[in-house]
Amino acid sequence: EKDAKAILKKMGAKPVKEKAAKKADDAEKKRDEIIKEFSKIKGIGPSKAEALYEAGFRSILELKLQPIESIARVKGVGKKYANIIKDYLTPSKDEALEEFSKIKGIGPAKTKKLVGAGYRSKLDIQVASERELEKIIGSAASEVKKSLGSVDARGILAKAEAVPPPKIEEPKKNAALRKKIQKILESSGEFLPRSVVDEIIEKIVNTDIPDKKLRELLDKVVGDYNRAMMDPLEACGIIGAQSIGEPGTQMTMRTFHYAGVAEINVTLGLPRLIEIVDARKKPSTPMMTVYLEGGYKVNRDMAKSIANKIEITRLINIAEIDTDLGNMKIIVNPNQKAIERKDISMEDIEKKLKSVRRTKINRASNSIEVLPTDETYRELQRISEELKNIKIKGIDGIKRAIIRKEKGEYVIYTEGSNFEKILAVEGVDKTRTTTNDIYAIYNVLGVEAARNSIIHEAHNTLQEQGLNVDIRHIMLVADTMTADGTVRPIGRQGVSGEKSSVIARAAFEITVNHLLKAAKKGEVDELKGVAENIIVGQPIKLGTGSVELSVDIGKMSKGE
């Protein structure tokens, strides 16, 4: 063995371990170089540079081409640093103008057009197709592409995996079935998303299904999945409108009792759907589902204490208010059972009565006398009316709170809503408590939560009427309503009224007003949308209408 090693050494052969070590060193060296290159980006440190490397980025070019959302999803980077990276890598308008002015074949006018269209670097021009450039700079596009060349962005973008897929930890039986399903799908060249595969596994994992039957099942699922996919440039808007509008004609116009809580009325059916798409500031029957945490959700007395704390209690609800005209005073006689049930003491009532202006308070054992400082009948009547509506306990807006036991825990349903203040109450589970007031959710939790609320409320409203509408169509409505970061109605006060096309706005509602205002301002309709092109009799830029064909007359005349 020693002799063999000596001979190999003389021949210049290196041991396998040494080769592997050198390979590892080279990889480590390359890794350090890339991280060092990323660290040059102003505003990010070595840790962020390392995170970018671990996510699969291997050059500044890849970062330039990657959408900001993908960079933001990298673990340890986030939206803030993604913006810093993009700002650093994207030249300013002035820098772009200077860079483009050096390109052969385009003058100052075309340079400005490129910058105006959003191009900021030579790389942007290299990635763009010649056809795209022709729309901006005309016939000069061909010469520009020849001088700069092209970059295939698809290969670069495919390399960078912003968040590596999570490892699936599951029982061996499930893992074996998943492997079998993936093998069948790969052999037929088909694809199913992980969520669909998970559902198939959940349904059939405990059945001894033969391979032939499994293949037939997967063929059926793949067929259904492909049919559910949208064709490129399909008119999804009109399909979504049809999908929701057609069953909407069968909806009822009544206010129903809330499912499972007969004491609470809630608007359902068509009126509720109109409220949702109109983005009404206040629903006609606001309500909340308040989930509890810890001991509160399993102990009825503790749940009752929260219900008492949030339900608004006025003096008229717990006491008799008598006016003694002869002695010019008002006598408040609290109902002892009512105040015990509501967990209110005489001291609480007395404290609230002291807040009434221009009065003196005398407390007896079971009653409280309220005397006006100005002894007139008018003043006595004013104080009497004020006392009836004085709030002793509770949160504004919560008219009633009802406790129900569901799935082993106590849940509070409220008539009325005050989302922000309810979430601040101790014992309330902030992660599950909901309201049907979409604007309250928007103001407290933001636009993404409001979008989810629109989807949830609209879907539930349709389902309660026995109508099954594809959730994606409802999601499209919610996306349209919240696209600009606020909650906008669909009607003329929102989405429809804010269209850039004059003709589309006029076609929706108040036609004459829109046309007069547009004429006064000298607006020009570019005819880029659907409605306006249909009105003037032009093909729409959707489906087959989106394809543009051109004929080379020169070649036709030559007979080629």
Image (cartoon, rainbow, N blue to C red):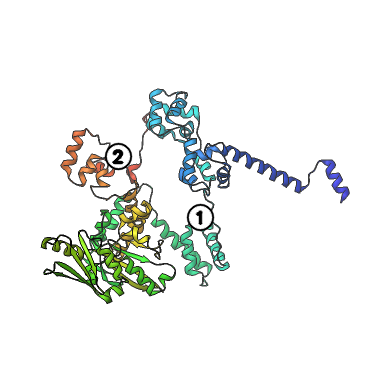
Q: What label sits on residue 528 in the rendered view?
A: 2
Q: Earlier in the sequence, mark 2 or mark 1?
A: 1
The answer to which image quadrant residue 324 occupies is bottom left
Q: Nearer the viewer, residue 174 or 321?
A: 321
Q: Are marks 2 and 1 in contact (CB under 8 Å)?
A: no
Q: How many marks?
A: 2
| Element type at mark 2 | loop
Residue 68 visible at all: yes
Relative to 263, 197 lies left or right = right
Residue at the location (14% across, 66% down)? 328
Q: Amino acid at mark 2?
A: Lys
The answer to which image quadrant residue 420 occupies is bottom left
| Element type at mark 1 | loop
Q: Please tell me whether residue 358 is drawn above or below residue 500 in the rendered image.
A: below
Query: In this view, which residue lies farthest toward the right?
Result: 3
The percent coordinates of residue 511 (x first, y second) are 17, 43
Label 1: which residue?
189
